[in-house]
Image (cartoon, rainbow, N blue to C red):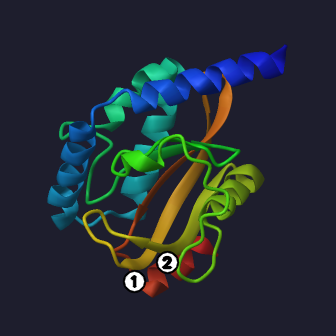
Amino acid sequence: MAVFFAVITLVSMLAWAQQFPEGLYKETEAACIASGSIKATPQMIVGKVDEACALLEKEGKAAFPKFLGKDSPFIFAGTYISIHDMEDLVLLHPVKAKMNGQHLVDLKDTNGKFVYVAMDKVAKDKGAGWVDYMWPKPGEKTPSSKVTYVKLCRVDGMEAVLACGANDMSEAEIRELVK
């Protein structure tokens, strides 16, 4: 019975994330790029992820629209918060709509690192922490070094991973965060 309800919850979450018009994702990406002149700090990222987790634990998937659009508090300093489950199913990616509903367990960066597997391991083992990998900045196609803070969170009774990172930190800053 629990599996049945988990499947129903997951299906409804995916339908929710996919209901938003493509234009809203483009607006979100443009807002993300426009806010890129502000450098995201680790403290800023952790604070926003904690805020997002509290919101999602309170409102569940009904809070998803708050992660999209130019006025979202979760689009800031050239970055965004994405949400996936522990099966590596993307529940909401605010700037890459085509990733929503996709199982990305096999997604590797240009160095061969399984990005979502690495995020899940940190979230599961530590509850929260940092992961480094190669990923393009919003609006760009070429990957660059990125460090992402991930946190395990409950969304409508299901475990989800919130992820938010920055491409503009130095290699020394990245090494310090992931150790």
Circle 1 SS class: loop
Please identify the quadrant where the C terminus is shown.
bottom right
Residue drawn 48% across and 69% down? 147
Horizontally, is 75 left or right of 70 in the view? Answer: right
Q: Are marks 1 and 2 in contact (CB under 8 Å)?
A: yes
Q: Where is residue 16 in the image (x, y as percent from the top left)?
A: 45, 24
Q: Is residue 51 visible?
A: yes
Residue at the disc numbered 1: 170
Residue drawn 58% across and 83% down? 111
In the rendered structure, which amino acid carries the disc numbered 1?
Answer: Ser
Circle 2 SS class: helix
On residue 174, the disc is: 2
Against 171, residue 127 (above or below) is: above
Please identify the quadrant where the N terminus is shown.
top right
In the rendered structure, which amino acid carries the disc numbered 2?
Answer: Ile
Few, some or many C-alpha atoms within 10 Å of disc 1 (few <14, some 14-19, many ≥20)? few
Q: Report the residue that reaches farthest toward the right.
A: 1
Q: Can residue 57 be seen in this view?
A: no
CA gap, disc 1 to disc 2?
6 Å
Residue drawn 66% across and 18% down? 8
Q: Nearer the viewer, residue 140 or 153?
A: 140
Q: Quadrant of residue 89?
A: top right
Q: Where is residue 23 in the image (x, y as percent from the top left)?
A: 21, 39
Horizontally, is 121 left or right of 110 in the view? Answer: right
Q: Where is residue 87 in the image (x, y as percent from the top left)?
A: 70, 45
Q: Where is residue 158 in the image (x, y as percent from the top left)?
A: 67, 29
